[in-house]
Image (cartoon, helix red, strand yellow):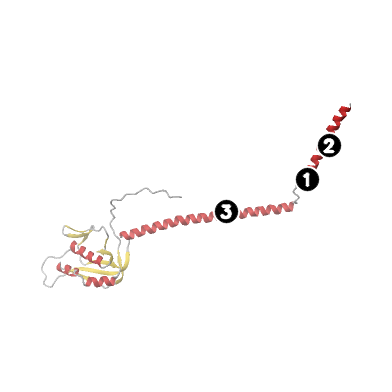
Amino acid sequence: MERKQKIYFTVITTIIGFMLAVQFQTTNDPVVRDTRDMWELREDLKKEQELQRQLLEEIRVYDTTLESYQQKRAKSKEIALRETVEELRKEAGLTEVHGQGVIITVEPIYGENYVGPVIETVSPYLLNRLINELNMYGAKEIAIADQRIINTTVIRDVNGITKVDNYKINSFPIEIKVIAEDAEKLYNRLKGSTVLEDFMIEGLQLEVSKPMNTVVIPPYRDSLRIRYMKPVKAEKEEK
């Protein structure tokens, strides 16, 4: 009987000790409760919503800035490409050009008592000779009878008629338009050139106009023949 009492006492003591330990722990770590009232919660909610709105607005601004940058970058590439193409067209003689220069007029010389064949054209030799002289004197652009002279131009005799590329030069007077870096210098050099005498020997005279502020030279009208070139596959742009 005494032994049972000891057991009961031990069990009861253990239970009481456990309860005291739990109560002590609860006292040391009290549960934190949200004591804010409804108005305070609403104010906090409004602040969070305002912060969220500001963040979304900043994201929208950054997205707009990024999109604008990408558009400008693409547009910049397009503009650069267009400018390059236009510059290449200009160098190839495919665009109309304006500049200071002179106009040379070629006409036959017929004296009062002239008896002989009618001159219908000017020889390819004389035209090539004149072009070489003009280039030596600073000519930048040349057109013969409104036919633009470019690097691939061919001046040749076809059945007694001179052709500049595919166009016949068989009607007088013939106008040769020249744009030069220094029109005054070109004019003076031409007036003292022996090329004038070469034309006179062939029964032709050259009249060189005074230097002009604006001479208009038309674009090359034929299609360009491109040889020894082929398109290549574009490489992928590095990121």
The residue nearer to you, when weighing 196 against 163, is: 196
| Mark sitting earlier along the chain (2/3) | 2
Asked whether, in this view, residue 93 is left or right of residue 26, the answer is: left
Question: Taking the image as drawn, is residue 75 in sight?
Answer: yes
Distance between the Cα atoms at labels 1 and 2? 19 Å
**Three-letter code for the amino acid on which mark 1 is drawn:** Asn
**Position of the N terminus by quadrant:** top right
Q: Examine the rendering and report whether any part of residue 94 can be seen.
A: no
Q: Which residue is mark 3?
A: 59
Residue carrying label 1 = 28
Q: Regarding mark 3 in the picture, which secondary structure is present there?
A: helix
Q: Amino acid at mark 3?
A: Ile
Please state which amino acid type lies under the numbered disc 2: Ile
Left or right: where does residue 147 sit relative to residue 77?
left
Residue visible at 14% across and 68% down in the picture:
201
Is label 1 in a helix, a strand or a loop? helix
- Marks 1/3: CA–CA distance: 46 Å
How far apart marks 2 and 3 lie (CA) works out to 61 Å
Spot the residue most to the right: 1
Q: Nearer the viewer, residue 44 or 14?
A: 14
Residue at the image position 86 percent from the left and 27 percent from the top: 4
Residue at 70% across, 53% down: 44
Q: Position of residue 173 (x, y in %)?
A: 21, 67
- State the image coordinates of residue 55 (x, y, percent, origin top left): 61, 54
What percent of the width, then of the height, locates residue 219?
Answer: 30, 61
Q: Which of the marked residues, 1 or 3, is nearer the chain's N terminus?
A: 1
Structural crowding at the residue carrying mark 3, measured as other residues with C-alpha within 10 Å and reported as few (<14), some (14–19) or many (≥20): few
- Quickly name the residue at label 2: 16
